[in-house]
Amino acid sequence: MLVISRKSGESILIGDDIEVIIIESQNGKVKIGVNAKNSIKILRKEIIDQVTAENLKASANTDNQSIESLGTLLKKEEDK
Amino acid sequence: MDKDELRSIKFVREIYGFENIKDYVLANASEKESNPFKVLKASDGSVSFILLEPNIVDEAYNPVLDQESELILKMKNKEDIQIYGIVVIPNNIKEMTINLRSPIIINRENGNAIQLILQDERYSVRHRIFDC
């Protein structure tokens, strides 16, 4: 892994199209700006872990018996 | 989708955590027409998910599809897009949640699908379906 020290206001370039700017660093928190094309997906890494965990949970319980009652339950909720 | 209709779905960007499974079948979860739940089942039978249209729980739900996703879905018309949220059903079904942050997007025209993670942080990974 490449490790670079930067001060607030300084930036690094990744390839030709991605600029990562250190906006401010305070109390162990770093504010980062990213300049990139719209097609570049930028996500907090935790969100991918959360989504994966939810998907695993969702796949573990798809017992069809409960689906009939769920449909009825949802209907009741909407009628309220 | 008509009642009892089975639809082949190909994930061109896979469901997170299930990257090795691309081919699924989408079907109504119940024979009752009033039941809005769908079942997304891997063609090899190894896994299945329960899906729900997000608009049923959030009328204003309107995720933005990025260009890259439109491209890999080979989307021609916006009207061809069908959106579902994956539902988690815990033992206490009143605590059932739907993932609004990373919906399943299907191109009805060709059956291509992706799981999209939205950048919009207003949408929750665990949105409660029932208020109480």
Image (cartoon, coloured by chain):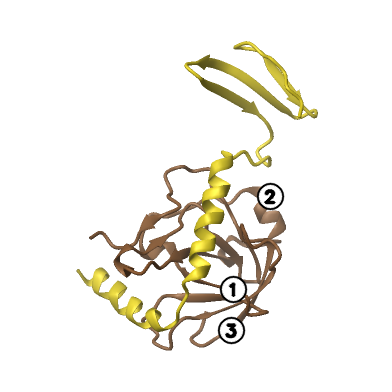
Q: CA distance from mark 1 to mark 2?
A: 27 Å
Hey, what amino acid is under mark 1? Answer: Val
* Residue bearing the label numbered 2: B68
Left/right placement of residue B69 relative to residue A54 reads: right
Give the residue type at disc 3: Leu
What colour has chain B? brown
Circles 2 and 3, Cβ within 8 Å, touching? The answer is no
Looking at the rendered image, the disc whose residue lies closer to the viewer, 2 or 3, is 3
Q: Which hue belongs to chain A?
A: yellow
Left or right, B44 with reference to B64: right
Which element is circle 1 on?
loop
Label 1 or label 3, whichever comes before in sequence order:
3
Residue count near mark 2 (Cα–Cα under 10 Å), binned few <14, some 14–19, many ≥20: few
Dividing the picture into quarters, in which one does residue A22 lie?
A: top right
The label on residue B47 is: 1
- What is the quadrant of the C terminus of chain A in the image? bottom left
Residue A24 percent location from the top left of the image:
54, 15
The crowding category of the residue bearing disc 1, from other C-alpha atoms within 10 Å (few below 14, some 14 to 19, many at least 20), is some
Tell me which label, 2 or 3, sits earlier in the chain: 3
Residue A62 in percent (x, y) is at 47, 75
Q: Which chain is indicated by disc 1? A: B
Image quadrant in which you'd find residue B12: bottom right
Residue at 43% in and 48% down: B123
* Residue B90 seen in this snapshot: yes
Q: What residue is at 23 percent from the left and 60 percent from the top?
A: B132
The residue singled out by tag 3 in the image is B6
Chain of the residue that carries numbered disc 2 in the rendered image? B
